[in-house]
Amino acid sequence: MDVSTVGRGTARSRVVDLALACHPGPAVAVTVFSVAMAAGADAPAVTTVLVGAAVLAGQLSVGWSNDWIDASRDAAVGRADKPVGAGRLAVSTVRTAALGAAVACVLLSLALGWRAGVVHLATVASAWAYNLRLKSTVWSWAPYAFSFGFLPLAIALALPGAPVAAWWAMAAGALLGIGAHGANVVPDLQDDRATGVRGLPHRLGGTATSIATALALVGATVLVVLAPPGSPRAAAAVALVAALGLTIVGTVLSLGGGRHRLPFTFAIAVAAVDVVLLVLSDWVV
């Protein structure tokens, strides 16, 4: 199948497929988390909106570039859940969308101030580097750690006075990124190997990756509970238990094998718990 020239259907169906090709779950989740962190740090309304717009544009560019770059691989393994790989959307369409979103991301990021803009653009560039090359290397985890780890710093620098994010907030973000990488990749290990992708999870294997993913997610939650100054609140203890439960369920599902995305959904849920804890703590210094 020549995925560069296909793309039938009505205009409405193409819009739906384009939305699906942006990886809407992670895109919406990261955007909502970023807005919550900005609003929780008492950012002005305009800044909060700009943070959301810049992060969303970056996430859209990353998601669309992923399906653009992986189009031939997705087609080769019959990924029906990928509109481009399944032949419902032309490669040129997602390529144009990815580049357009990237341009919007540059403009919106710099509107937050040059410091915040440069840091945020670095996180987006890191994610593009994963799509372009690093996903097939032993360093496949690094872009996730970098992008998620430095996102809190970008948000903090956008606030009045350009403060910085606490070290533990950035470390927790990096661990969440590593956990998200593992949970996202495990269901695709077999297809990835068939198309020549050999990132760190492919070299470790599904079981080791699932265990490492759980440790990273738990480590992130422990950091946001114990690292902030002062005694942990009762709500933080409850959140830690909830995150541990979500991690255990996600890990069990991951170890069970299959192509389902529930482990990744549980990883996002753990991230949501951690973001709530961040909003309730003094993560901006």
Image (cartoon, helix red, strand yellow):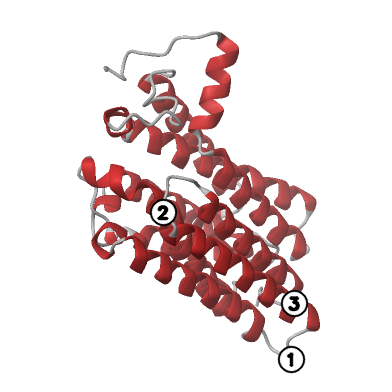
Q: Residue at x 46, y 58 (%)?
A: 254
Closer-to-camera residue (204/164): 204
Tell me which numbered mark, 1 or 3, is placed earlier along the sequence. Answer: 1
Q: Residue at x 70, y 71 (%)?
A: 277
Vertical position of residue 170 compared to residue 100: above or below = below
Query: Which residue bears the numbered disc 2?
Result: 257
CA separation in Å, label 1 and label 3: 14 Å
- Mark 1 packing: few (<14 Cα in 10 Å), some, or many (20+)? few
Q: Are marks 1 and 3 in contact (CB under 8 Å)?
A: no
Whether residue 147 appears in this view of the structure is no
CA separation in Å, label 3 and label 2: 30 Å
Residue type indicated by callout 2? Gly
Query: Which residue bears the numbered disc 3?
Result: 238
Query: Which residue bears the numbered disc 1?
Result: 231
- Mark 2 packing: few (<14 Cα in 10 Å), some, or many (20+)? few
Residue reaching furthest to the bottom:
231
Locate the N terminus and report the quarter of the image it occupies: top left
Mark 1 or mark 3, whichever is nearer to me: 3
For mark 3, give the secondary structure. helix
Whether residue 268 appears in this view of the structure is yes
Q: Are marks 2 and 1 in contact (CB under 8 Å)?
A: no
Q: Position of residue 3 (x, y in %)?
A: 31, 20
Q: Position of residue 206 (x, y in %)?
A: 34, 60
Q: Position of residue 184 (x, y in %)?
A: 44, 52
Q: Would you say 162 lies left or right of 201 here?
A: right
For mark 1, give the secondary structure. loop
Tell me which numbered mark, 2 or 1, is placed earlier along the sequence. Answer: 1
Q: Would you say 94 lies left or right of 59 here?
A: left
Vertical position of residue 57 compared to residue 145: above or below = above
Mark 3 or mark 2, whichever is nearer to me: 2
Q: Residue at x 32, y 13 (%)?
A: 5
